[in-house]
Amino acid sequence: MAVKYKRVSGDAVEYAVFARKTRAEPLRQVGSVVAPDDDLAAAYARATYDEERWIEMAIVRKDHVIALWTPGES
Amino acid sequence: MSLSGLVLSIADNKQMLGLRYAEWATRAPSLEADIAAAAMGLDDLGHSRVLYGCLDPLGEDPRTANRETDPASLSALPYFDEPWSSWAHFVAANAILDTAFTVMVEACVNGKVEVLRHRLRKMLTEERYHFLHGRSWLRSGIEKGPLDEAWKQAIEWFGPPDGDTAGLHNEGKLSMGPVELKARLEERVETKAPAIRLDWNGWDPIRRRTRPGAVDDLTFGMLRGLEEKRFAPATTEKQA
């Protein structure tokens, strides 16, 4: 279950940040950010992980990820 | 004012906006907001460099020699004269003034001046994240004072209804005049500007502001490298 955070502006949630450098490679998780809404999460992800020359970056709310199994359950 | 004067004003304001953002890189309400403040500061400082670089191709560089010594020679808004004293000042600048500058850049990119059409386009992509940041924090609610002040200065900066930006719009150099710029700003931030009484009699068309004043001495000294010189060895020749 995704961790819920209390931040300055309401309830904040965790977003996973995905990116890739070339079309040939798949998107991979490069980190995460915590934000109260999608707009701020996008701004934070771009600010935090824009050091490299990504050709694509995407964010996903961690509580929108459907886990099939987790470590220790397989 | 000429188009290059307007471009200089965008550059000076973005430079000051970038510096004021950077001042909050360790004072924002969360670590993520700290990082965003630093990143947006770097973006706007970079944008100012690009804009200064457009002055020569425009054929007329309005920068005068007294920019090295006189803080009041910079064409930046009163909002940037002093460091911001609250997060609300940051958010109001981020949401309203930063977006106002972006809307003006948009008017340049969609105008008929080739150098601006090409060189400024990338800024609009980068500014999207400043906008998302500002809009989100604005929605969370901030004090009215800084917000009203940011709106007032943004509308003043667009210029009077029959002023220079209206003329540049009529010539096709800008795709929007002051009326359209204000409407576009309202559309982008999804809110109407507060009722503001503007007195254009005291408006300075070069600095695009009504209130006198200038950027604080410490910031001006840092901008001009004067602070750095204070710490430089007195006899640099001997060390060479």
Image: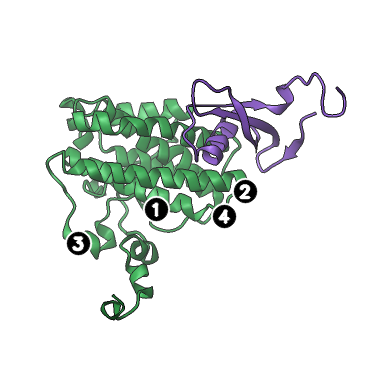
Chain colours: A purple, B green
Between circles 1 and 4, the one closer to the viewer is 4
Which of the two labelled residues, at mark 1 and mark 3, occupies the earlier sequence position? 3
Q: Are marks 4 and 3 in contact (CB under 8 Å)?
A: no
Checking the image for residue B80, the label placed there is: 1
Which of marks 3 and 4 precedes in the sequence?
A: 4
Q: Nearer the viewer, residue B171 or B233?
A: B233
Mark 3 Cα within 10 Å, few/some/many (few <14, many 20+)?
A: few
Q: Nearer the viewer, residue B233 or B13?
A: B233
- Pinpoint the chain carrying mark 1: B
Q: Compare marks 1 and 2 and give the one earlier in the sequence.
A: 2
Residue B147 visible within the image:
no
Identify the residue under disc 3: B66
| Residue at which label 4 appears | B26
| Residue type at numbered disc 3 | Asn
Secondary structure under tag 2 reads: loop
CB under 8 Å between callouts 1 and 3?
no
Q: To which residue does mark 2 refer?
A: B29
Instruction: Specify the amino acid type for callout 1.
Output: Phe
Same chain for labels 1 and 4? Say yes or no.
yes
Subunit bearing disc 2: B
Near mark 2 (Cα within 10 A), the count class, few <14, some 14-19 or many ≥20, is few
Measure how far apart labels 1 and 4 are at the Cα level: 19 Å
Which comes before the other along the chain, label 2 or label 3? 2
Location of the N terminus of chain B by quadrant is top left
Could you say where residue B74 lies in the image, as x and y percent from the top left?
Answer: 27, 54
Q: Is residue B176 left or right of residue A23?
A: left
Q: Is residue A44 left or right of residue B205?
A: right
